[in-house]
Image (spheres, helix red, strand yellow):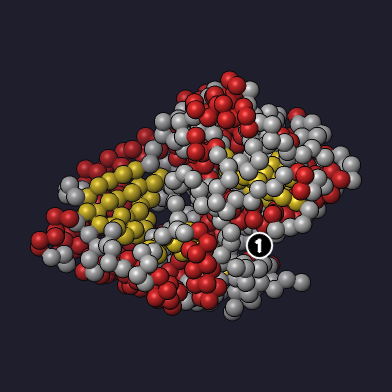
Amino acid sequence: MPQPTTDLWPRLRDLLPLAERPVRYLNHEFGSVYRTPEDDPADTSFVMVYPDTYELGQANQAIRILVNCVNAQPGMYAERAYLPAAEFADQMREAGLPLFSLESCAPLREFDAIGITLPHELAATNVLEVLDLAGLALRAEDRAEADPIVLGGGPCAFNPEPYSAFFDAICIGEGEEAMPEMVACIGAGRAAGKTRQEILEDLADIPGTYVPGFYRVLPDEEAAAWGYRVKPVNGHALPEIQKRVFEGFAQSPAWEPCIVPFADLVHDRLSVEILRGCTRGCRFCQAGMMYRPVRERSADNIVEGALEGLKQTGYDEVSLTSLSTTDHSQIKEILERMNAAVAGKGIQISIPSQRLDSFGVDMAALVAGEKRGGLTFAPEAGTQRLRDVINKNVTEEDVFSSITAAFREGWRRCKLYFMIGLPTETDDDIRGIASLVTRVYEAAREVTPPDQRGRVRVSVSLSLFVPKAGTPFQWDGQIAPEEALRRVNLLRHSIKFRAIDVNWHDPATSFVEAVMSRGGRECCDVIEGAFKRGARMDAWTEHFRPEAWRAAAEEAGVDAEALAQRTFDLAEVLPWQHISSGVHLSYLRLEHKRAFKEQTTPDCSFGTCTGCGLCPDYGIDVETQEVRVG
């Protein structure tokens, strides 16, 4: 069984003076777990990789969770790795230095298993950068028997097809239990002398595990008859992969050991996950579908965990994270208890974007203390008609009551998130954004004391709709980048106050996201072609190379515009249909039809079951949201 070594450190040390930020590549941060193969040579070695720089990856909760879960199991251990910045990756290639783990500075290719998360579509070429720097074949079919088993997972795994050629196996859903099972399976297979094929067959027997090499792509007619776009060619492969759900989330400790980094991170604070899942039912939101069911940690668990985390790490800020933090049934009690516990200690409590109602503002006041920085709200659309289409279930009254309450309480800045290019959107909806934010600004000034009105600022952040797999809008195409820019300019020219700032995402990057989100296995050739033309770090403005993507698509014979912009028929078999989030396809179709009738669907957490189908399939008590297995 190959074991990591530390022979790389002297070579890395000599190279570090050339790095833009050497601190990205240094180990032994406070709280890191450091082990050597000598501790137990029989242990299975696993390295978890975030395919971007340390500042982004170390702040990612999933990396921390999975490394901790594997390290907690006997017979295996986990380390971390991050993608070097582009300039240092070039230095490493020139020096012949392979990608290494952080803890022991061991080459990735010497581990038994490598896990790479797929956090967003623009990380696609970064996955290949990881494999290439590690000295591994880009495609799973080209790897040698002794090479590590490469595992994938994360949000983009709900359409794994564009990445399928590069991974040996992909975990669908939550990994707290699944990832240790997969690592143990690989270790046992290695110890028993099994072939790579045999190990992959064992992995395919683990619920929630997709082995792409065990499937073939079907032509249209055969796919329509079969009901899926791919079909198993190995007896261990299932026709449909059901996502994994971590059954013990609510009872698991809110405090998990975490690392205090040397470098500044994008979110450099203690993060405590208080709630998982969201059933508000926004029809564009993939996270709201794939993280169901809703599960809460108790107030006692959260408060005790947060305080223990602050004590262990020395952070002066704690963020209570979830998809919708203020939906926690005990959030008021949690914030009041946290405030009392940290009073006078200079510790800040933060929560993600606020709910658009007075309760959300009340909760923001509880965490702000004397500080009144900026609040973030997400109306998503400028007219009530379009908010009904997307099932946002927010009214103008909600928006204005929240804004006026906030500015009366001392806030002077707010950010409003909107999405353009949503299905059924018209120019009137774009002008509706301008009208809404203008009236928000005027309402905010009206309740602000005259001597402070010059400080009132409203920021508008625009993103372009990207159709996501497993959502009611997965069938709807994206508008063309040129049309997106036209709508952005229409909005900008419709706003008259200089105190309203408008920011927008580059439509060219959103176009690539849509292609990756909706594509099938043909996109593997596109990703590889773009990478070989120099595409990497595509989420970084200075590195994004749209011409590389377009040339790669042309060479691969892929109509990228059709993939991103075509509207699929509701009866069409989609490339990702064999991957199930637990939400029934029939429910997604029903929600799509409701959208085009401008009908809303209530949140089942606060009302009756809406029939998505997940709870019965996963043995969940609809009344308590408790997972009952077996």
Counting other residues with Cα less than 10 Å from the Cα at mark 1, is it few (<14), some (14-19), or many (20 or more)? many
Corner quadrant of residue 72: bottom right
Determine the secondary structure under disc 1: loop
Q: In the image, what residue occupies the spot 24% across and 69% down? A: 409
Residue 375 lies, in percent from the top left, at 31, 60
Q: Quadrant of the C terminus?
A: bottom right
Q: Is residue 478 visible?
A: yes
Residue 25 is situated, as x and y percent measured from the top left of the image, at 55, 37
Q: Which residue is mark 1?
A: 245
| Farthest left residue in view | 450
**Along the line of sight, which residue is nearer the eye, 382 or 353?**
353
Q: How many marks?
A: 1
Q: Quick check: can you spot residue 215? A: no
- Residue at screen point 49% across, 38% down: 23
Q: Is residue 570 left or right of residue 404?
A: right
Instruction: Give coordinates of residue 623: x percent, y percent.
Output: 59, 79
